[in-house]
Amino acid sequence: MNEKGVLVVLSGPSGAGKGTICKALLEKEDFWLSVSATTRSPRNGEIDGKNYFFLTKDKFEEEIANNRFLEYAEVYGNYYGTPKEHVMEVIDSGRDVILEIDIQGALKVKENYPGGVFIFILPPSMEELRNRIIGRGSETPESLMIRFKSAYHEINYVSKYNYAVVNDTVENAVKKIQSIVAAEKCRVDRIKEEILDSKEGLIHEQLYD
């Protein structure tokens, strides 16, 4: 029996560093990065199937009707979603999948695939989060306040997740996530078929040894 892969879902407030952590994980582990589908037009240099799966609005709505997304949302007139089929195929092949997504999307994925590993990325402190947002250099005082208030509110969702990882340094955060995934792969409810196969094999050896 081939061991299935694990779906790892990373979320956190803006400025917590989940994108950086995701990139670092991909450099260290053989994760498959989930590719989203969208109805928006491809931008210069974007490749269908690599950056996004580019679908027509009619096709996307057909996929919604057929329950083929783990989650989806409409943003500024365009649909975005996580195709279920592609994720399940990779997981069934034994490879781990990583999905970096906003909190609302992650909670929808949890409804549709509760067997995933849901990890909330936290900043070391709210002051550090504020400094990181400022450090981007793209915020006005007004937008900074909006983002900071939004992040403060989003942290309340941490209890909906399986794990919380404080991003004090990217290296430490990556090591913690690697440990979480390794531990998850040892959970009895994930490997019960392998345990049963091993048990049957042991009984067979005892009977015919």
Image (spheres, grey):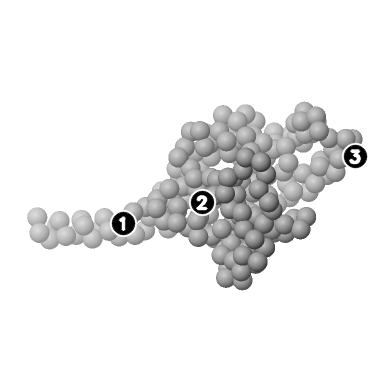
The image position of residue 9, as x and y in percent, is 58, 49
Residue 34 in the image, given as x and y percentages of width and height: 55, 49
> Which label belongs to residue 142?
3
What's the CA distance linking mark 1 and mark 2?
19 Å
The answer to whether residue 197 is left or right of residue 205 is right
- SS of the residue at dot 1? loop
Q: Amino acid at mark 3?
A: Glu
Whether tag 1 and tag 2 are in contact, CB under 8 A, the answer is no
Q: Residue at x 76, y 31 (%)?
A: 136
Q: Earlier in the sequence, mark 1 or mark 3?
A: 1
Residue under label 2, please give it. 7
The residue to which callout 1 is attached is 1
Q: Earlier in the sequence, mark 2 or mark 3?
A: 2
Residue 31 location (% of width, % of height):
48, 42
Q: Earlier in the sequence, mark 1 or mark 2?
A: 1
Give the residue displayed 78% in from the left and 48% down from the top.
153
